[in-house]
Amino acid sequence: MPDLNHDGDSAAAVSSLRSAVMLLGRRLKHQRVDESLSPTEMSVLGTLARCGSATPGELARKEHVQPPSMTRIVALLEAKGLVRLEPHPDDRRQKRVSQTERAEAMLAESRIKRNAWLAHLAEGLDEDEWETLRAAAPVLEKLAHL
């Protein structure tokens, strides 16, 4: 593996990748079904959908926010009927957060909207570019979870 910080071509590629991922991420965030939810609230719902129920502390770690912030986010989502708090099976001092059916439906609708938007963008690629992007998708997925 080349030294990505000091090799000029690699550093430029890393910079270009960072810029493109950030821009695409920002544009995707605007393709929301429910404009009343913040991107952070949507992210928490997505984490619950992927990982299942979790304590507020576990969610805070996964979302890279401080526990008091996550407590506020969970309270907002609960007030909107998108999550419910349940007793922790092993520790009475803690609660488990899980998404509601309403949240599941909203996330499904949001995924459909975002996928359609991204598919529309991809229609502007030529066949070679599309094949390159398809081949890169698993690598980007891996990178996102390192």
Image (spheres, grey):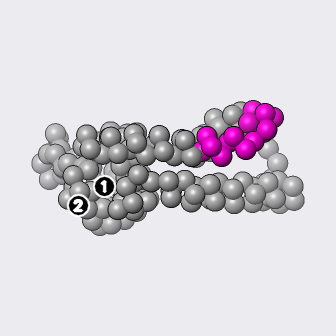
- In the image, is residue 77 above or below residue 66? above
Residue 8 lies, with reference to residue 143, above or below; the image says below
SS of the residue at dot 1?
A: helix
**Count of marks placed on residues:** 2
| For residue 85, side relative to residue 137 (left or right) | left
Query: Would residue 55 appear left or right of 16 to someone viewing this image?
Result: left
Q: CA distance from mark 2 to mark 1?
A: 13 Å
**Precedes in sequence: disc 2 or disc 1:** 1
Q: Give the residue at x 51% y 46%.
A: 114
Q: Quadrant of the N terminus?
A: top right
Residue range corresponding to the magenta coloring: 118-131
- Residue 57, numbered label: 1
* Residue at (64, 59) in percent of width and height: 23
Q: Which amino acid does the dot numbered 2 rest on?
A: Ala
**Label 2 Cα crowd, 10 Å radius (few <14 / some 14-19 / many 20+):** some
Q: Quadrant of the C terminus?
A: top right
Q: Say which amino acid is labelled 1.
A: Gly
Q: Position of residue 118 (x, y in %)?
A: 60, 45
Drawn side of residue 118 relative to residue 83, left or right: right
Q: What residue is disc 2 on?
A: 75
Q: Looking at the picture, how far across and down is residue 32, in whole percent?
A: 44, 54
Above or below 98: residue 39? below
Coordinates of residue 89 in the picture (x, y in percent): 16, 39
